[in-house]
């Protein structure tokens, strides 16, 4: 029996485990790094232990620290969650040696499955279909080919290579990334399966010889080799294939003596053949999909098994009820190759309806930094049909208020509503081929109404805090004066707002070229922020939620959220970066500086490479010119927006300098290395 | 909470109401047209030329200077009406909030005669300084002026006729320099933003200010420009070296802040006001959340009759401008042609004196008492004028109407609480004086579009003149030609009528502007708040009352 469970993890999964443990009457112990002090998972737990040190490596990835924390808190069991040390055999061994009950398979199984090459042979021996493994100089290598890290996971150290000349460089980069992420540079090659689907089977095994599978999860929607949408059942499986894959998974599990909850991952070809990929010896991010359709609490089963009890379910009791879909909300920029983003969560408000399962580790005020995975939350819908599950998930996501960090929300909503997805046309290349827009394109009218709402909210805030004449109508005039003005930028475009109020409280807003007649204007508190009710041209009342956190303001309507940059009325001279400035798109560490002052560069020339979130990001010149200043050097820690390099336009310095040539705002584009 | 809510007997569905409302709206639309023309300044072309030089029109400068979404009360927006000058008088004057501080803001309109100082704009400037002084409000001037209006004669003018009619003199206008520096001595900060030329006499505007902000490349401040210097000393010089912003910021020290452009200058002025940490000396409003009146202010449009000899129930006006329509009436049954009582407007405590007919001895005495009471409790007074004068006639003279009227004027003259007057309709004779007229240091005087201000009513005026002529004719024993007498009478009445119109007065800066009746409560709130910038304190003593 487990009395007190320590959780060597953070964020939503720590909260998830705490929830089930608590309902089973088990006390919980949270662990936290300094940056996570006061986080929701810390507050949810009964006890919390600080992990001293910096970054993940000294805290959640530190075996000794984690075991020590569990012992100090007098926990009798340790749950690793997912990620971090969840598939680390050393932790399992150390925990068991320290007398803790380990929630997971035996250390030997973890170790065996952690080496992908070893796992492949074990599965092949058990009769599970596997793809051939190639080495770098194998003449049989077919392109395109996939470079994978033996110790890999989460897409790290993975590269798609299309031609042989690219191979050595890709292997080197993958090895470097794998070494950075897992401390093991070993990589291998595998055939890249075209039009593939990622199908995984959830398994459970107890120490009484019971093995069950809880059907599949389809996780084909991926970007950067990481899943973003998962569902059960898969639209590609019929009962026969479902049984075949479930049987294969259990065959493999039995062969290796599996214990606890695990996932056997397969790649499914469009001809129905499937190949073993790997076994994840832990709870998965996407486990709630299975829980929704089967009604089984997987964390509870994990804890039962760890305590030596039998599983609570038998294979014949299990069936799939309805359809469940999970979407992962990431702090990342879909328009910028899904690169991770950082920031402070200014608003995290989830709608009461539709009723979805929200699992999040962040809240308003949380800092999304570079130390940890940028997943903000996952959202799970469960409905009688796939269509309803997809639509309610999209609606719930679109209604949520997620401000302060750039997220993939709009992309997820668009993906869930796309015909390709609704048709079940989900293959691993979906993100690249389905044509789902990376950004929501708000109409001119939507932007205009949003800017008007932002101005109304700002006006309300100013008027309600005015030190004098507070109860005189805002902007009141007794003569002909210019209208009140507010300026914003939306995705680099100026949004100029002019407005004036009539005697009856109606208002005329001119936003760029659009004129809006507003009536029924009301502004009320809706923490955090303000709710603006307005009727545009008499079309019925709309409610918009406005949150201002300079230099940004967000306006959410039924159509979605629009982020505006506030253009200050009075700018301070000299506060702008010079033209041709390359600024860091995210916080990170400079891996190398590829140019020196005076170098002549062309558009696309690599200037600086920075590492963030364990990924290398190549920053290139937006235009050709000569390098003026270089302000950083390798090893420097840089902040988002920090000036790195200035490229002077060579042409502009010459005697024939063309005048008035517009240059792109961004000045340099960040390009993630693939 | 003062008093019970007033009832109102106005039949808003009646024909009278509708026709009065229509007439008022017609007057308002005429005023609206004049306001548009004032705002247009020197016209679209001149404005375009201004913008092409990187400059903003004056109203835009002011709109960026004041706090966003804050109110702005323009003072005398139609100054110059029916004069040789453009409506508006080439200057914009108003009360605006800058960094949370109510300020007097005045600026030249450089599109109108290059912002030259004219008889009208000097009156506005003097009024601006007076408002700042009486109400202890920081003073900001936005300067861009070609200097004094040197045009003496127009083509075809008879020089002697022009001189005969002109009773102003250059020497008088020096008073503005006196008043600017006096403000500073009284502890009222003065700020000049120089956007363009400010030369000769104009150079003293920044010269005498506490803080000067010059726009680089645009501000030019010198006593004598290149032609004058050349005439005086033979020295050849250029504008920039004589009086450019950069020179003044780095060499002469006349500029305290050098702004890169107009927006930077405005930003700087706001920063200057911000660092004053200005504290108002008055007690401020009693509540930040006053009740609106129970009756729709829109109904104020339908109260004033076309014929101002008709009485108006002034409580119907009060009910639509005071908070919660609450009014604690004082001496309701005594001297009932003057309504006196206590109320709140925009949260500010006030005493109200409002005409409800001709002033009799009792009403004058009641006024004298009420004004003294307001001084006892340091409460500002609001006068609502609709007055044809003090009662005349044998009985009234014998009853001491002169004495009693004098008591009222004595109480008013020596009262030290702020007075604000709204002229709703008639404002004739000594009634204008006794009811807080302009000449009595009234802090603000506003007119409704229906206001008429004169020694007496135009009909009475024509009638009196006719009687005098008939008496003369009788004495000299000749017969008046009735037709020409009628024509003369009509001409006199028409002239008197035209001269009595509110617009005529406002054109001469004899008031602070004509307001939309629906804005009365808002205007009074802003004016009261301005008055509370200074100490609000009743008179410690009084002159001898003739009892």
Image: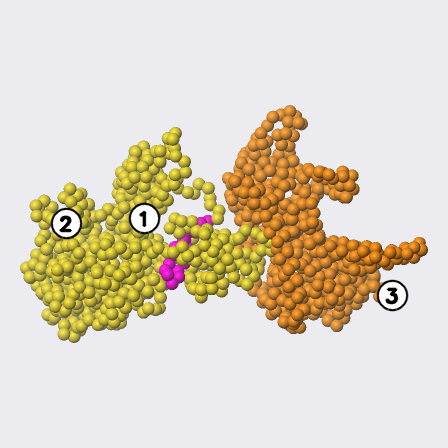
Chain colours: A yellow, B orange
For marks 1 and 2, the one nearer the N-term is 2
Q: Is residue B517 visible?
A: no
Instruction: Using residue A198 as the reference point, say whether residue A544 is left or right of it.
Output: right
Along the line of sight, the residue nearer the viewer: B4 or B276: B4
Q: Is residue A558 magenta?
A: yes
Along the line of sight, the residue nearer the viewer: B151 or A317: B151
- Residue at the outermost top position: B234
Q: Are the residues flagged by discs 1 and 2 from a single subunit?
A: yes
Q: Which residue is mark 1?
A: A586
The secondary structure making up most of the magenta span is strand
Residue at coordinates 30% horizontally, 67% vertically from top-left? A392
Q: In the image, which residues are magenta?
A: A551-568
* Residue B61: percent from left, percent from top: 55, 46
Q: Is residue A271 above or below residue A606?
A: below
Chain letter of the residue beneath label 3 in the structure image: B
Of the two numbered discs 1 and 2 in the rendering, the one whose residue sits closer to the viewer: 2
* Residue B306: percent from left, percent from top: 70, 63
Label pair 1/3, CB-CB below 8 angstroms: no
Chain letter of the residue beneath label 1 in the structure image: A
Instruction: Using residue B209 as the reference point, say whether residue A57 is left or right of it.
Output: left
Along the line of sight, the residue nearer the viewer: A260 or A270: A270
Label pair 1/2, CB-CB below 8 angstroms: no
Mark 1 and mark 2: Cα distance apart in space:
30 Å
Q: Which residue is mark 2?
A: A145
Q: Which residue is mark 3?
A: B394
Q: Residues within 10 Å of mark 1 (few under 14, many from 20)?
A: many
Residue at coordinates 58% horizontally, 39% vertically from top-left? B196
**Quadrant of res A650:** top left
């Amino acid at each position: 029996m487990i009395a007190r469970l320590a959780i060597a993890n953070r964020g939503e999964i720590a909260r998830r485990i705490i929830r089930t443990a608590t309902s089973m009457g088990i006390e919980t112990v949270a662990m936290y790094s300094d940056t996570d002090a006061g986080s929701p998972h810390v507050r949810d737990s009964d006890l919390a232990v600080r992990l001293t040190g910096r970054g993940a490596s000294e805290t959640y990835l530190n075996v000794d620290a984690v075991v020590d924390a569990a012992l100090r808190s007098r926990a009798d069991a340790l749950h690793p969650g997912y990620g971090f040390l969840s598939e680390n055999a050393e932790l399992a061994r150390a925990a068991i040696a320290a007398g803790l009950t380990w929630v997971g398979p035996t250390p030997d199984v973890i170790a065996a499955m952690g080496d992908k090459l070893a796992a492949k042979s074990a599965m092949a021996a058990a009769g599970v279909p596997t793809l051939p493994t190639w080495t770098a100089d194998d003449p049989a290598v077919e392109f395109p080919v996939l470079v994978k890290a033996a110790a890999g996971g989460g897409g790290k150290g993975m590269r798609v290579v299309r031609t042989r000349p690219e191979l050595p460089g890709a292997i080197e980069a993958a090895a470097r990334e794998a070494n950075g992420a897992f401390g093991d540079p070993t990589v291998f090659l595998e055939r890249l399966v075209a039009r593939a689907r990622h199908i995984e089977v959830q398994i459970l095994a107890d120490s009484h010889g019971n093995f069950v599978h809880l059907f599949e999860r389809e996780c084909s929607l991926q970007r950067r080799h990481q899943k973003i949408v998962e569902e059960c059942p898969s639209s590609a499986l019929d009962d026969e294939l479902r049984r075949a894959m479930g049987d294969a998974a259990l065959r493999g599990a039995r062969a290796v003596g599996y214990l606890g909850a695990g996932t056997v991952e397969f790649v499914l070809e469009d001809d129905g053949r499937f190949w073993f990929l790997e076994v994840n010896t832990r709870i998965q991010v996407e486990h709630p999909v299975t829980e929704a359709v089967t009604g089984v609490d997987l964390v509870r089963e994990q804890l039962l098994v760890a305590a030596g009890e039998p599983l609570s379910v038998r294979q014949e009791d299990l069936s799939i009820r309805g359809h469940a879909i999970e979407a992962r909300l990431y702090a990342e920029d879909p328009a910028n190759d899904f690169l991770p983003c950082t920031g402070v969560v200014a608003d995290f408000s989830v709608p009461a309806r539709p009723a979805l399962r929200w699992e999040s580790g962040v809240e308003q005020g949380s800092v999304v930094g570079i130390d940890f995975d940028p997943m903000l939350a996952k959202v799970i819908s469960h409905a009688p049909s796939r269509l309803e599950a997809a639509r309610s998930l999209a609606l719930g996501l679109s209604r949520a208020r997620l401000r302060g960090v750039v997220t993939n929300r709009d992309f997820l909503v668009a993906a869930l509503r796309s015909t390709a997805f609704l048709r079940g046309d989900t293959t691993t290349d979906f993100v690249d081929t389905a044509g789902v827009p990376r950004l929501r394109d708000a109409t001119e009218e939507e932007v205009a109404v949003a800017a008007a709402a932002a101005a109304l909210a700002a006006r309300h805030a100013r008027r309600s805090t005015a030190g004098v004449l507070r109860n005189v109508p805002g902007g009141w005039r007794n003569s002909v004066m210019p209208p009140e003005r507010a300026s914003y930028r939306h995705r680099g475009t100026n949004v100029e707002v002019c407005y004036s109020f009539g005697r009856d409280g109606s208002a005329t807003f001119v936003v760029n070229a659009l004129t809006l007649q507003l009536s029924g204007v009301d502004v009320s508190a809706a923490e955090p922020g303000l709710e603006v009710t307005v009727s545009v041209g008499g079309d019925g009342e709309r409610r918009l939620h406005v949150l201002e956190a300079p230099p940004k303001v967000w306006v959410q309507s039924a159509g979605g959220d629009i982020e505006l940059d506030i253009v200050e009325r009075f700018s301070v001279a000299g506060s702008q970066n010079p033209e041709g400035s390359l600024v860091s798109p995210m916080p990170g560490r400079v891996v190398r500086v590829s140019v020196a002052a005076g170098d002549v560069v062309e558009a696309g020339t690599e200037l600086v490479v920075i590492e963030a979130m364990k990924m290398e990001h190549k920053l290139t010149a937006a235009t050709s010119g000569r390098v003026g200043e270089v302000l950083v050097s390798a090893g420097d820690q840089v902040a988002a927006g920090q000036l790195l390099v200035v490229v002077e336009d060579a042409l502009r310095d010459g005697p024939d300098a063309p005048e008035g040539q517009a240059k792109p705002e961004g000045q340099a584009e960040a390009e993630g290395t693939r | 909470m003062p008093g019970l809510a007033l009832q109102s007997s106005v039949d808003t569905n009646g024909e009278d109401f509708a026709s009065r409302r229509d007439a008022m709206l017609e007057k308002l639309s005429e005023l609206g047209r004049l306001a548009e023309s004032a705002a247009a300044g020197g016209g679209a072309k001149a404005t375009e030329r201004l913008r092409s030089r990187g400059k903003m029109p004056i109203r835009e400068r002011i709109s960026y200077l004041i706090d966003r979404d804050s109110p702005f009360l323009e003072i005398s927006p139609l100054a110059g009406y029916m004069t040789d000058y453009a409506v508006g008088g080439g200057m914009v004057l108003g009360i605006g909030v800058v960094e949370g501080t109510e300020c007097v803001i005045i600026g030249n309109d450089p599109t109108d005669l290059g912002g030259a100082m004219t008889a009208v704009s000097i009156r506005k400037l003097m009024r601006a300084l007076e408002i700042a002084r009486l109400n202890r409000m920081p003073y900001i001037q936005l300067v861009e002026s070609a200097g004094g209006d040197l045009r003496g004669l127009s083509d075809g003018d008879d020089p002697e006729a022009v001189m005969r009619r002109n009773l102003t003199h250059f020497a008088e206008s020096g008073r503005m320099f006196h008043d600017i520096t006096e403000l500073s001595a009284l502890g009222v900060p003065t700020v000049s933003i120089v956007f363009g030329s400010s030369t000769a006499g104009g150079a003293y505007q920044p010269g005498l200010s506490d803080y000067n902000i010059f726009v680089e490349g645009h501000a030019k401040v010198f006593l004598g420009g290149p032609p004058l210097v050349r005439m005086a000393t033979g020295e050849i010089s250029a504008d920039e070296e004589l009086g450019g912003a950069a020179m003044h910021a780095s060499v002469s020290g006349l500029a305290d802040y050098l702004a890169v452009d107009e927006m930077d200058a405005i930003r700087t002025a706001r920063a200057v006001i911000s660092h004053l940490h200005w504290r108002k000396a008055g007690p401020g409003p009693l509540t930040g959340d006053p009740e609106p009146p129970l009756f729709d202010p829109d109904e104020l449009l339908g109260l004033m009759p076309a014929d101002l000899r008709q009485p108006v129930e002034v409580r119907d006006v009060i009910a639509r401008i005071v908070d919660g329509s609450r009014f604690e009436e004082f001496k309701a049954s005594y001297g009932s042609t003057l309504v006196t009582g206590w109320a709140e407007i925009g949260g500010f405590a006030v005493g109200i004196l409002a005409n409800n007919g001709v002033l009799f001895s009792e009403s004058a005495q009641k006024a004298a008492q009420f004004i003294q009471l307001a001084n006892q409790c340091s409460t500002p007074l609001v006068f609502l004028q609709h007055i044809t004068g003090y009662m005349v006639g044998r009985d009234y003279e014998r009853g001491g109407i002169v004495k009693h009227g004098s008591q009222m004027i004595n109480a008013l003259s020596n009262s030290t609480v702020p007075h604000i007057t709204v002229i709703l309709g008639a404002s004739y004779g000594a009634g204008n004086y006794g009811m807080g007229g302009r000449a009595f240091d009234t802090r603000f005087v506003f007119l409704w579009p229906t206001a008429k201000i004169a020694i007496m009513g135009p009909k009475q005026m024509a009638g009196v003149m006719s009687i005098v002529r008939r008496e003369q004719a009788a004495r000299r024993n000749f017969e008046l030609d009735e037709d020409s007498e009628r024509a003369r009478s009509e001409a006199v009445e028409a002239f008197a009528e035209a001269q009595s119109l509110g617009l005529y007065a406002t054109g001469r800066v004899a008031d602070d502007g004509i307001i939309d009746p629906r804005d009365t409560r808002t205007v009074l709130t802003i004016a009261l708040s301005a008055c509370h910038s200074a100490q609000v304190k009743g008179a410690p003593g009084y002159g001898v009352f003739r009892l």
